[in-house]
């Protein structure tokens, strides 16, 4: 089985594909932890969503071109799930791959198979020539469980403290990825949105993974970056879905690397028209990062 990470070198937007062989050993998976020997203590196992607050975030088991891949996804309703466009388009032509097979794993609930796929009409394939509009929607004839779904329709603002959720590779910021991607262990972390990049009406968000020893960032046991298998996982501010994690820039989960994805600020019209879901008019998300972090720390103590 293979796990695909989409890596972008800015500003040339050239893509490096890093393909990692999944381990057969017992699994521990996470959004990346901080430094192994930095303070406060941190590890991949500390990033587990132990209270199932994000039960609407699922893991994707993907079969494409004879290979298995891992991804993440966020359920919007009992019938619709949002994920990265490149999770259904591995030949980068902007279309859903022929013969694609996808299973959505919702730990504690079961495994669900989508009935159809819709890829964003402006997605042309990953970095072909851009990575904007990297979105796809999965439809499920057989409804998913009635979960506490995220709030739709809000916009992402610069300097917002956001929550990242996914099932991808983990490790430590001091030396990078050390584990494989998962279908069972949902991990969470936080970062602050540094800037946006636009192309037409497409908007990318970006953030950096600060070394806690410099005194920057949210702290060793809070700040994170995504890894292979996190593509398609949600970026949230509070309970509001505001983006989708899709790419990294750098050397493989190390401090100083950049993470990012698709801001949903200009994507709600397509989501609403495709799904038929009621999406409120966007409003700027202005939530204090301290509040978000407090909720996370309380969850970890349970």
Image: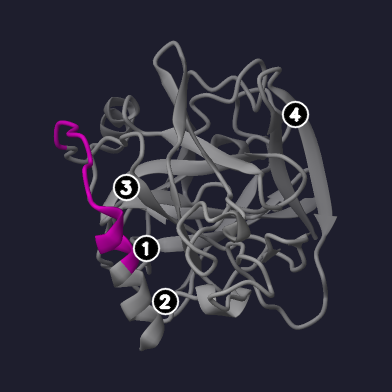
Labels in figure, total: 4
Mark 4 / mark 3, whichever is N-terminal: 4
Residue 270, image x and y in percent? 33, 27
How far is mark 2 from mark 3, CA to CA? 22 Å
Give 205 or 76, whichever is nearer the viewer. 205
* CB atoms of marks 2 and 4 within 8 Å: no
Indicate the secondary structure of the residue bearing disc 3. strand
Q: Main secondary structure of the magenta part?
A: loop
Label 2 vs 4, first from the N-terminus = 4
- Residue topped by disc 2: 109
Q: Nearer the viewer, mark 1 or mark 2?
A: 1
Distance between the alpha carbons at the discs numbered 2 and 4: 36 Å
Q: Mark 4 = which residue?
A: 15
What distance separates the C-alpha of mark 1 from that of mark 2?
Answer: 10 Å
Q: Is residue 287 magenta?
A: yes
Q: Quadrant of the N terminus?
A: bottom right
Of mark 1 and mark 2, the one earlier in the sequence is 1
* Quadrant for the C terminus in the image: bottom left
Name the front one of labels 3 and 1. Answer: 3
Residue 56 is marked as 1
Q: Which secondary structure, mark 1? A: loop
Tell me what residue is drawn at x 65 percent, y 54 percent: 227
Residue 91 seen in the figure: yes
Q: Callout 2 environment at 10 Å: few (<14), some (14 to 19), or many (20+)?
A: few
In the rendered image, which residue does mark 3 sit on?
241
Which mark is first along the chain, 4 or 1? 4
Q: Position of residue 34 (x, y in %)?
A: 61, 65
* Disc 4 secondary structure class: strand
């Amino acid at each position: 089985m293979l796990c695909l990470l989409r890596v972008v070198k800015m500003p040339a937007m050239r893509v490096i594909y890093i393909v990692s062989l999944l381990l057969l050993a017992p699994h521990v998976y996470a959004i990346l932890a901080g430094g192994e020997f930095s303070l406060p203590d941190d590890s991949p196992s500390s990033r587990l969503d132990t209270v199932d607050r994000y039960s609407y975030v699922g893991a994707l088991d993907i079969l494409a071109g004879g290979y298995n891949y891992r991804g993440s996804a966020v359920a919007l309703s009992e019938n619709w799930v949002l994920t990265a466009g490149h999770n259904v388009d591995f030949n980068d032509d902007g279309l859903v791959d022929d013969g694609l097979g996808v299973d959505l794993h919702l730990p504690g609930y079961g495994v669900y198979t989508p009935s159809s796929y819709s890829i964003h009409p402006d997605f042309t394939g990953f970095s072909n020539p851009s990575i904007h509009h990297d979105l796809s929607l999965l439809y499920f004839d057989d409804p998913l469980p009635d979960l506490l779904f995220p709030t739709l329709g809000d916009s992402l603002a610069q300097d917002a403290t956001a929550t990242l959720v996914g099932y991808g590779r983990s490790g430590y910021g001091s030396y990078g990825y050390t584990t494989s991607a998962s279908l069972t262990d949902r991990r969470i972390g936080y970062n602050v949105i540094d800037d946006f990049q636009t192309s037409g009406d497409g908007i990318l968000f970006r953030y950096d993974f600060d070394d806690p020893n410099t005194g920057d960032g949210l702290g060793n046991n809070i700040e994170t970056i995504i890894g292979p298998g996190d593509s398609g996982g949600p970026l949230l501010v509070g309970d509001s879905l505001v983006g989708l994690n899709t790419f990294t820039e750098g050397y493989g989960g190390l401090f100083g690397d950049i993470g990012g994805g698709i801001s949903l600020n200009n994507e709600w019209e397509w989501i609403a028209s495709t799904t038929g879901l009621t999406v409120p008019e966007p409003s700027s998300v202005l939530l204090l990062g301290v509040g978000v972090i407090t909720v996370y720390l309380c969850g970890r103590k349970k």
